[in-house]
């Protein structure tokens, strides 16, 4: 059974940091482009960061404040987010897209990140 399970969300103060993890099961992420997306209240889902082999991409809203990494051996992807802002409040989703043609696509259930003082 294919699964993506996110963890690490929670409540954090502005300026703080969070480390989100995505654990994959049922498939090997080594053949997948892995990404974090988020959906802020009242907004469309947007790309936060993505990592292939070896390219890395960041959305403008988090560029310079976030680092995405992958561990193919552990089948996990991690997003380190620093200098969090109120507007980073969102549900964060992990996504896997098979390379090179994107024939398979999987989403996790999401983890809530709330930035509040």
Image (spheres, grey):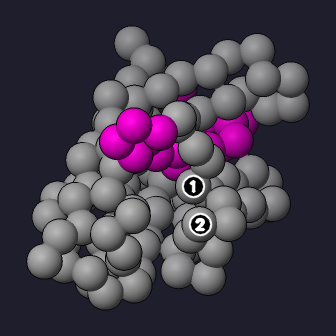
Observer-side mark, 2 or 1, equals 2
- Which of 37 and 74 lies nearest the eye of the viewer? 37
x and y percent of residue 76 in the render? 45, 50
Please tell me in which quadrant of the rendered image residue 78 appears: bottom left
Q: Which residue: 52% across, 44% down?
A: 37
The residues colored magenta run 27-43
The quarter of the picture where the N terminus appears is: top left
In what element is the residue under mark 2?
Answer: loop
Q: Residue furthest front?
A: 42
Residue 6: tell me if it is visible.
no
x and y percent of residue 68 in the render? 56, 65
Please tell me in which quadrant of the rendered image residue 59 appears: bottom right
Say if mark 2 contacts mark 1, CB within 8 Å. yes
The image shows residue 64, relative to residue 71, as above or below, that is below
x and y percent of residue 46 in the render? 58, 44
Q: Gap between marks 2 and 1, in whole Å?
A: 8 Å
Q: Residues within 10 Å of mark 1 (few under 14, many from 20)?
A: many
In what element is the residue under mark 1?
Answer: strand
Disc on res. 48: 1
Specify whether residue 91 is painted magenta: no
x and y percent of residue 11 in the render? 14, 64
- Which of 29 and 50 lies nearest the eye of the viewer? 50
Disc on res. 76: none
Q: Which residue: 68% across, 36% down?
A: 32
Q: Earlier in the sequence, mark 2 or mark 1?
A: 1
Disc on res. 61: 2
Q: Is residue 35 left or right of residue 15?
A: right
Specify whether residue 33 is painted magenta: yes
- Which of 53 and 109 lies nearest the eye of the viewer? 109
Q: Is residue 1 left or right of residue 27?
A: left
């Amino acid at each position: 059974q294919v699964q993506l399970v996110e963890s690490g969300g929670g409540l954090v103060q502005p300026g703080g940091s969070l480390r989100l993890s995505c654990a994959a099961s049922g498939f090997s992420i080594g053949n997948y482009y892995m990404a974090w997306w988020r959906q802020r209240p009242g907004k469309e889902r947007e790309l936060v960061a993505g990592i292939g082999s070896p390219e890395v991409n960041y959305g403008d809203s988090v560029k310079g404040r976030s680092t995405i990494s992958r561990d193919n051996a552990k089948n996990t992807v991690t997003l380190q987010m620093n200098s969090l802002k109120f507007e980073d409040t969102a549900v964060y989703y992990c996504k896997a897209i098979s390379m090179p043609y994107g024939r398979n696509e999987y989403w996790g259930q999401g983890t809530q990140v709330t930035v509040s003082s």
